[in-house]
Amino acid sequence: MKKIFKYLFIGMFGVACLSSCSNDLLETEPTDSMSGSTFMSDATKALVPLNGIYRSMYDFGWSVTGNYHQVFGISSYNLMSEVMGDDFIMGKAGSGWFWYDAAYDVKDMYDRSTWRPYDLWMAYYTWVANANYIIAGEETMGGLQEDVDYVIGQAYAIRAYAYFMLAQTYARNYNFQSDPCVPLYTEPTMTTTTGQPRASVKEVYDQIDNDINHALDLLANSPAQRHPSHISYAVALGLKARISLVEEKWDDAFNAAQKAISVSGKRILPVSQFIGLNSVDQANVMWGAQIVADQSTKYASFFSHMSTDISYGKNAPKQISTWLYSKMSPTDTRLVWWDPNDATYSTGGYIQRKFDFSDLQTWAGDYVWMRVEEMYLTAAEAACMKGDEATAKQYLMALMSVRDPNYDTAKTGTALGALTTDITNSLREEILIQRRIELWGEDGRFYTVRRLKQGFVRPEEYGWPAGLRSTLHTAAWKDPASYVWVMTIPQAEFDGNVNMDPNPIPVGDQNPIGDYPE
């Protein structure tokens, strides 16, 4: 990292201060006079910067000078990756938030601090940087060993998660092992730190694997989740399952998902019991942000972009494609998540009702980042890919018996079509279709399409508006090896900085701005 480094640690304790305003887990208020070593000397005090990281995961402002209303942490990047996919339709541009993501029209904005190439890089590398400060205290931190393991384990998990998302955004998929990926930093850094060049895809995933495995070793010694926003042992297992799916390590994915279900103590809920998907207190939620009224980011929030009670949701209505909606039977209880009869906001797809504020007057609504239902679907897919179709159907039916009383499947096999709408009628495809329905708006669909090495189409008959059916990208959307899927790196990483010479990333090492290298 280069010029962006200037912003990372100046704000470290400022970020921690944000969390201390209303987080009853914190026992120590940070002050400007406190040093990093003071915080890291004791596991209880280390909760201050740790909770600061989590607070920043749902705060806004990752763009430095503008576009704040589309940069509110993890949920904004989940929404970004949904609109970039094939199932989640923005009917209109509205105020423009997320429209340019959906239209694949942000890569040439790499030289600005107000657009996606910069703010996503800034957010995830800030979490890496602050996690590194906590990890540096691993050998010297005082306190009960289980408290130390709880803090340090989460820091490793945060770093693994951040690099995982960076790798999926700024490089081609996992199969391109020798491609340049992102720089690796694993030690505390400052403006005088020597910048690193881009590591390869393989090197970055090796680091991700090492970090998540070490996180699991530590968190196993202190498995209880002390706050819904914390990456507990069960959540780290869930992250391990996600990573293993991308790496196609099916045994690891199955084992992590199965254990996450067991350890979390969470259970599949009927649709009627988690209306609005806006509470981390629900019995199916493994990880999320508990947002109290005075921490609401109002218009710069997930629900403001989803709810048709707010202008953003009204003017840029979010809809499911008619193709995916048609895959549900008349007895599927998830049908209530969308309204096919809405004539006010629908522009071709079906308006979403899955996500909504818990209290519109106070802009309240928690962000859900991981549900146990995901783990059942992951276990089902991994078992299928291992050749154990009986177990795959067992996990699939555990979910579907709660979603559709008439559901059953006799499908078999693992074949997928070249495009996400090319039907093969395999068991794996069936599991993935149920995943698309169940986790619509949550899963980061763009990233799933990438890991499956499929392409997609956006035809008008599925509900796609003209502005998102761009012929500019039609060929690349069908090509998993294209660079349409790869974000450009912020120009700030290439601009010289006297405190970080030599230049860590050569100027010519920018990702292609177009869908293919020139």
Image (tube, rainbow, N blue to C red):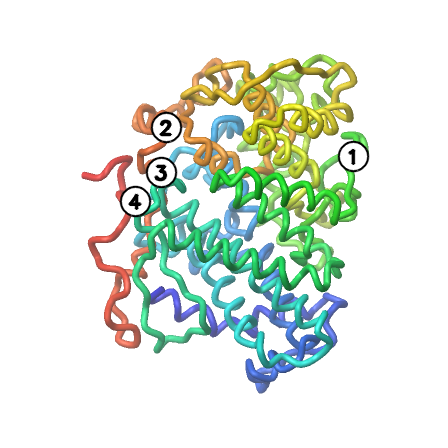
Labelled pair 4, 3 in contact (Cβ < 8 Å): yes
Percent across and percent down for residue 382 are 58, 34
Q: Earlier in the sequence, mark 2 or mark 4?
A: 4
- The quarter of the rendered structure image containing the C terminus is top left
- The quarter of the rendered structure image containing the N terminus is bottom left
**Cα–Cα gap, marks 3 and 2:** 14 Å
**Residue bearing the label numbered 2:** 477
**Cα–Cα gap, marks 2 and 4:** 18 Å
Nearer the camera: disc 2 or disc 4? 2
Residue 269's disc number: 1
Residue lying at 30% horizontally and 61% vertically, measured from the top left: 197
Q: Is mark 3 on a helix, strand or loop?
A: loop
Nearer the camera: disc 3 or disc 1? 1
Residue 108's disc number: 4
Nearer the camera: disc 3 or disc 2? 2
Whether residue 283 sits left or right of residue 383 in the image: it is right
> Considering only vertical position in the picture, is 341 above or below 314?
above
**Residue bearing the label numbered 3:** 105
Q: Is mark 4 on a helix, strand or loop?
A: helix
